[in-house]
Image (tube, grey):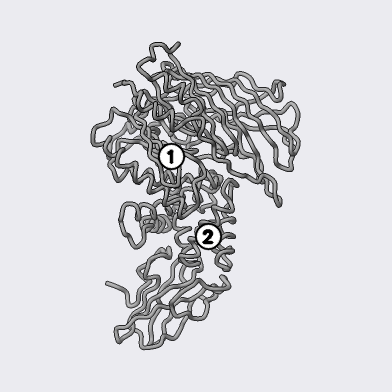
Amino acid sequence: MKFKIGSILCLCAVLFSSEIKAQSNTITYKKDGFWQQQADYSMNIDMDVESYQFKGTQTIKYTNNSPDVLDRVYYHLYFNAFQPGSEMDARLQSIQDPDGRMTTNIGTKEKPVFESRISKLTEDEMGYIKVKSLQQNGKSLSYEIEGTVMIVNLESPIQSGETVNFDMEFDGQVPIQIRRSGRNNKEGVSLSMTQWYPKLAEYDDEGWHADPYIAREFYGVWGNFDVKITIDKDYIIGGTGYLQNADEIGYGYTDADVKHKGKKLTWHFKAPNVHDFTWAADPDFIHDTMQVPNGPLLHFFYQNTMAEDKLENWKKLQPKTAELMQYFSKHIGDYPYEQYSVIQGGDGGMEYAMCTLITGERSYGSLVGVTAHEMAHTWFQFLLATNEAKHEWMDEGFTSYISALAMNEVMDRNADNPVSGSYRGYVYLANSGVEQPLTTHADRYSINQAYGISAYSKGAVFIAQLGYIIGDDNLKQTIKKYYDDFSFKHPKPMDVVRTAERVSGLELDWYLIDFAQTTNTIDYAVKGIEGNTVTLERIGVMPMPIDLTVTYTDGSTEDYYIPLRMMRGQKPSSATVKADWAWAHQTYSFEASKAVKSVQIDPKGMMADIKKDNNTFPASE
C-alpha cells in the first residue's frame, strides 16, 4: 500500500531542517606522534528504482596526515562480493557452517546440504560497482580491480601533509538482499544501502587495510560526507546525516504535488566526522520521531504494511530507545551527534553511522534487544572505530557487554550477572577443541560458530572479567576514560589495557596476553581442607587473582581475596586479603581464622573458569 504522508514530512521539514547544525567533533590528527587520515566525500547519486541500478559521481578530498609518501591508494567495492564466483561466494561454499541467511538448504533437515545464494544470482540480480573514470587533481589514473578491491596507481605520490582530490564516475547495481546490503529484503524493504559506494581504504600506522569483503565487518577513514540522492518521489529515505532540504522534499508529498515537476526528488544529506554513509529507502515507510531529554532526536523508519501487533511493537520501542540512549551516554560517554535513526531493513541487525538497520517483524522484546545491541555499537564501533577485521572482539564483545547491562536495567530484568550467557558461551567454546585466539583475523576462523562465540561472548567476558580483576568501580571509570581518550582514534587492544592500568594502578599486560592472544584457559580448584588450612591449585595455564568464600564449621562465612603477584597490587576489596600468589607455584595454601567446613572459589561467577565442578570443596552434589 502506498499513501501520502504530508503531515509526517511536514514534521520532517522542522526536524531535519538545514538549521540543525552538525555536531562539531574535534579530532586531533597530529599530536604527540598520533595521526590518522582524512577523507571528505561529496557524492551525487541517481537511483532507478525499477532496475535497481544507479549512477554516481564522487569527489574525495583526501589528506595524508601520515609521515609516509603514498604512491598508491585502495578502494573497497563491496557490492562486487554479490556475484557468482566472488570470494564471499567461495567462502560460503567451503566453510562447514555457512551463514543460513546467505544459503539455501537443498538437502533435508536431517541431512542439510547448503547452497550459496550468491552462486545462483543472475546478471540482473547480482551487485556491482563499475568505475568509469578516476582522476587525481584532474589527471586520469590507471587502476586494477580485484574482486571487491580496486588498486590505484597514483599519477603523483601524495606527500606527507598533502591534500589531493580524487574524482570518480561510477555505475552500480543493488543486489538482491543476501547479507546486510541489497534490495527487497525478506520483509519487503526496497533498498538497504549499506557499503554501497566506492570507499577509500584506511591507511594507518600498520599500513593499508584493503581486505576483501568476505562477509565480516569494516574499517574506515574518518571524514565529512555531503551526499545527494535522487530517487522516485514516492520513496522515503532514512540514514546517516542531516537532511539539508526538508522543505523541498516535504513539498513533494503535499496534496499539491501535482505541481511538482518530474517523477524524482533529490535528498541532500550532510554528515560530519563519520567513517561510513548508509541509507535505506521504501515507499511504505512510516517516520516517527522522539526527542531524548538532553540528547539527540531519534528517528524511526518502518513499514506501514506490517501486522498491527508489529506496528504496535515499533511504537512501544520508541521510549525504550530513548532510555537506551540515555543509559549509554551515562555509562560510556555523551553521544556527539544531534540525531540517531532506527530503520527497518537489512537481514538482522547492523550498526552504521548515526543509525542502525534492523529487521522489524519481531516480538517486542527482540525488537528492543536488537536495538540495544546495535545502538551500543555507536560507541564501540562508530565512535571508537576499532579495526573490526583484526580486533572484532573489541567491537562485538564490548557492545554485547554494555548492551546486556543496559537491557538488564531498561527492561527491569534484575539479573545478578547480566553477562552470564556470554560466560556460558565462552566456556563452551574453550572446552570444544575448536577455539582460536582473539588475535585471529575475522575472516580466518575455521568455523563461523567459533568466530561468533569469540567475537561476541569471549569479547564480552574480556571486559566483564576485567571488572573482576580491577574492581567494578575501576571498570566503570576505565570504560569512560577509554571512550574519552580514544573516541575518533581507532584504538587497539593495548589501549584498553593501558587505560585500565592508569585507572587501577595495576599491571595488566598478562591479561591481554593470556586471554586475547592465546587460548590459555583458567582452571582453579580447591585441592583440600585440613583443619584451618585451605589448599588451592592452579590447573589451567592462565593466571588470575582469586575471590573465595569460606564457610566455617560453626556456620559462619568469610570472604577472602588472594592477589596475583604479577599484578603488583590488588583491587579494592572488603574481603580478608591474603599473601599474593605467584603464577609459577601451582599450589597455594593459607590459614583461615577457624576450622573450615567448605570453600567456594569465585562465588559470584565473574571469573571465566572453564571447569567449575572443582571450584567447591567438598564438591557440591
- Label 1 amino acid? Leu
Question: Where on the picture, by quarter, is residue 295?
Answer: top left
| Viewer-closest of 319 and 547 | 319
Q: Quadrant of the C terminus?
A: bottom left
Residue in view at x 63 percent, y 19 percent:
133
Local crowd at mark 2 within 10 Å, few (<14), some, or many (≥20)?
many
Residue at the spot of label 2: 478
Nearer-N-terminus badge (1/2): 1
Mark 1: secondary structure: strand
Q: Nearer the viewer, mark 1 or mark 2?
A: 1
| Viewer-closest of 279 and 484 | 484
Compute the Cα span from label 1 to label 2: 28 Å
Q: Is residue 264 above or below residue 555?
A: above
Q: Is residue 414 above or below residue 22?
A: below
Q: Quadrant of the N terminus?
A: top left
Residue at the spot of label 1: 297
| Viewer-closest of 7 and 482 | 7
Q: Position of residue 45 (x, y in %)?
A: 52, 21
Mark 2: secondary structure: helix
Q: Position of residue 153 (x, y in %)?
A: 70, 28
Q: Position of residue 545 (x, y in %)?
A: 49, 71
Q: Position of residue 77 (x, y in %)?
A: 55, 29
Q: Is residue 272 left or right of residue 163?
A: left
Residue in view at x 42 percent, y 18 percent:
232
